[in-house]
Image: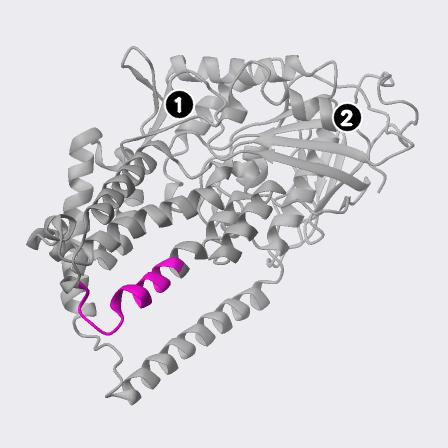
Amino acid sequence: AAGSVVLASLLARDGAGLNRLYYGTDTRAVGLALGALAACVLARGHRTGRRRIGRVETAGAVVGATILVIAAVAIDGGERWLYGPGFLLIALASLAVVTAASGDGPVGRLLGARPLVAIGRVSYGVYLWHWPVIVLLDRDRTGLSGLRLGLLWVAVTAVFTVASWFLVEQRSLPPAIAHPWRTIGYVAAAVTIGIGANATVSAERAGRGDVALPDSPPPSGPLVTVRTTVDAGVVAADDELGAPTTGPRSEPTPRPEPTPATTVVHAERDVADTAPVERDVAPLGPQVDVRTRPTDRPLRVLLIGDSVAASLDPVPETPLDVTGFGPVVVRNEGIVACPVLRLGTWKFGGRVIGDPDECAGDDRFAPWVDEFRPDVLLTLFGWPARGEGRHLDDGSVISPCDPAFDGPWADELELIAQRFADRTSVVVANVAPPGLEFSWDSAGARCLNAELARRDVVIFDFAEWICPGGDCTEFDALRPDAVHFAAADDIRVPVLAALVGNSLVTAGFAAVD
């Protein structure tokens, strides 16, 4: 438990991604370890219910329960202080309640009520089923919200829980000392399933080769010929006007009027026809000048955004090798639940999702720009249509495709671009529609992107890059949950390199093939 708290604290302080902190068994082991310790201490060979619980333990349970209620209401999981001291506090609060309930006292009698005991007995089924029920039966699919939607979730979860209890859990006899072969059988079955699952995944990956990255769309601004090498996970661009110039980046070289061009895409995928595909392209956003590259250091790219950007953490400690640009120093400051639109508050599953402190204030992101001094600032915010919309102070709710949402949302991105225009080249990635099970609901992304196209910002067509022609299915492996990028290094690092290359090309930096 102590080792888990220390490790989580160190990784959180060093800027590890929230996915690493939240899903890592080593960083979350404090609750499991303290629970196992408490089981050994409390049981000691006799029935725990016979222990007499005094006032001190009862008072500790009241304090612990209060902490747990406050945590459930006020914490959304994105707070870095949780990883280490925060989850230690929650584990201790839980132990205070469990200790007082595991004996003869008021807490034990209260929590020993038959309905609560029945829920406790099937609690694993509740834990197992509630999340897919919430994900699938959302407001968009059911047309319900608030209390009615919550009651539907409870009812459906109860049905699945009862069914799995009688059909699966009761039919699976637990391991026992008196029946050692039962234990050996369960272990053998678990090992076989694990080996089979890994073999299946390995065979699938071997059959399809490396996960392909999307083709590069035409960059914003002047037309250039873009060549994308998918299996390398990088973007290389040949500027039609010749080799890039050198000199200080603060004095960009004026570019002649662009001439019509085509995009030549080499897509090395598992398809029979791998011949280059040519298509006419048109610029997105305002035209940009050719940028000169610094001669005394690698290019620097700062990535800001929400959980989509955060899913690309951690960035390599060494400069990222981007074909055509050489080593590029990348800093990722994506923050889970960081919104573009700051009006009102988000609600998801009936809970208010507070905006992180790092995303508050008119000068948000400025400290990172001032400290890192990037050549390109790439904004990468995800699809904001999930949940129950943005709840305003007057009680109204606004969502994508509502002009009251779309206009201020695009205004905020334009404001970010304007705020840092004198310090760096700002590239705004538009919104990619969701894939997989959410692919039916991409109207919000289309509405937002149409509004963003009217703003004076340089746009990287992220939507077309990840969902060419509006079809997101081809690259579902990149986004296993339909929104965020896969955590595997063999996917995450090439995706990051491709995005960095696209941002540099879009900003006007010419690559050398």
Label 1, on which residue? 400
Residue 35 magenta-drawn?
A: yes
Would you say residue 85 is visible in this rendering?
yes
Q: Eyeballing the image, is 277 above or below 39? A: above
Tell me the kind of residue under disc 2: Gly
Q: Sequence-wise, which precedes: disc 1 or disc 2? A: 1
Q: Eyeballing the image, is 443 above or below 165? A: above
Taking the view exactly as shown, the residue that stands out farthest to the top is 394
Local packing at callout 2 (Cα closer than 10 Å; few below 14, some 14-19, many 20+) is many
Q: Eyeballing the image, is 381 above or below 269? A: above
Q: Considering depth in this image, is 64 or 21 the residue closer to the camera? A: 64
Tell me the kind of residue under disc 1: Pro
Report which quarter residue 228 is drawn in. top right
- Residue at image point 44% right, 17% down: 406
Element on which disc 2 rests: loop
Residue 508 numbered mark, or none:
2
Q: How is the image coloured?
A: one colour
Local packing at callout 1 (Cα closer than 10 Å; few below 14, some 14-19, many 20+) is many
- Main SS type for the magenta part? helix
